[in-house]
Amino acid sequence: MQRYFVNKIEEENEITIVGDDFHHISRVMRMEPGNQIICCDPKGKQAQCEITEITNDKILARVVEWIEVQTELPISVSIASGLPKGDKLEYVIQKGTELGAIGFVPFIAARSIVKWDEKKGAKKVERWSKIAKEAAEQSHRSVIPTIHSPGNLQDLISHSKNFTYKVIAYEEEAKRGEKSALSLIFNQLQPGDSLIVVIGPEGGLTDKEVTKLQEQGFVACSFGPRILRTETAPLYILSAVSYHFELAR
């Protein structure tokens, strides 16, 4: 059954669908009144709904049955990525959404090769948000991850203040054979806690950046003995969280 995110579920459980989702339902899927879909509101509530009317610019539906199912990670994980080259961040957002990330915080790192263009930035963030929405629908998420506009390291530090735990994926820790820091944090995390994970761009983070983050409570961790690419590390940490908190318990 097709899944769509709606702005709100109105009084008497009525729903109005417009924009791209209207086009997808009416023109791509060619649905008709009586067909059923799943709708998710911004609070993560899910409902099986029946289409009642299709007009020239909107679709009306009503809730048939509320769905009680948990598809979100018990830990809220945000990925802070140093801006990488090409379409790597699109890949991270798509696959990271499928794996349960709740937010993506791109930042301009010292070794970021990409130069962020503020004039074109809004369209880029809009595209990233669309990728996250489509991935959330495909993977049966109940919420769409938040995509933040790229800032600098200080912006990232300011954003991180509300998180329960803060981690840096640091390859130098892997080279030194460090193995316990991430495991210790996992053992302290409780359902409902939040975790932000900082991952550098190609070339990694500088020692100065790592020190500055550590001064703000970030913990430098190894993600195992192998050195991971900037687009692989986010998928590693999200998979590890899922295994530890969803499958191993």
Image (tube, rainbow, N blue to C red):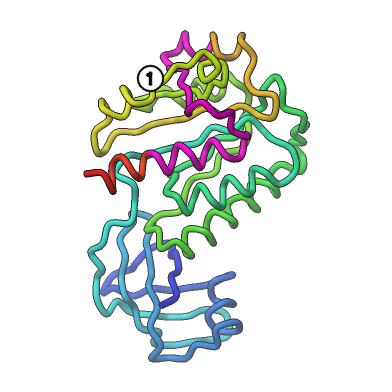
Name the image quarter holding the C terminus: top left
Residue placed most toward the observer, 78 or 157? 78
Q: Residue at x 48, y 39 (%)?
A: 236
Name the image quarter holding the N terminus: bottom left
Q: Residue at x 70, y 19 (%)?
A: 110
Residue placed most toward the observer, 8 or 180? 180
Question: Residue 190, located in which quarter of the rendered image?
Answer: top left
Q: In screen coordinates, is 128 left or right of 240?
A: right
> What residue is disc 1 on?
181
Q: Secondary structure at mark 1?
A: helix
Q: Residues within 10 Å of mark 1 (few under 14, many from 20)?
A: some
Q: Residue at x 28, y 47 (%)?
A: 246
Q: In screen coordinates, is 237 left or right of 14?
A: right
Where 68 falls versus 57 (above or below)? Answer: above
Residue placed most toward the observer, 181 or 101? 181
Q: Residue 18 at what x, y percent from top left?
A: 53, 72
Please say whether residue 172 is one of the residues in the magenta stretch.
no
In the image, what residue type sits under mark 1? Ala
Counting the numbered discs, the total is 1
Magenta span covers which residues?
212-240
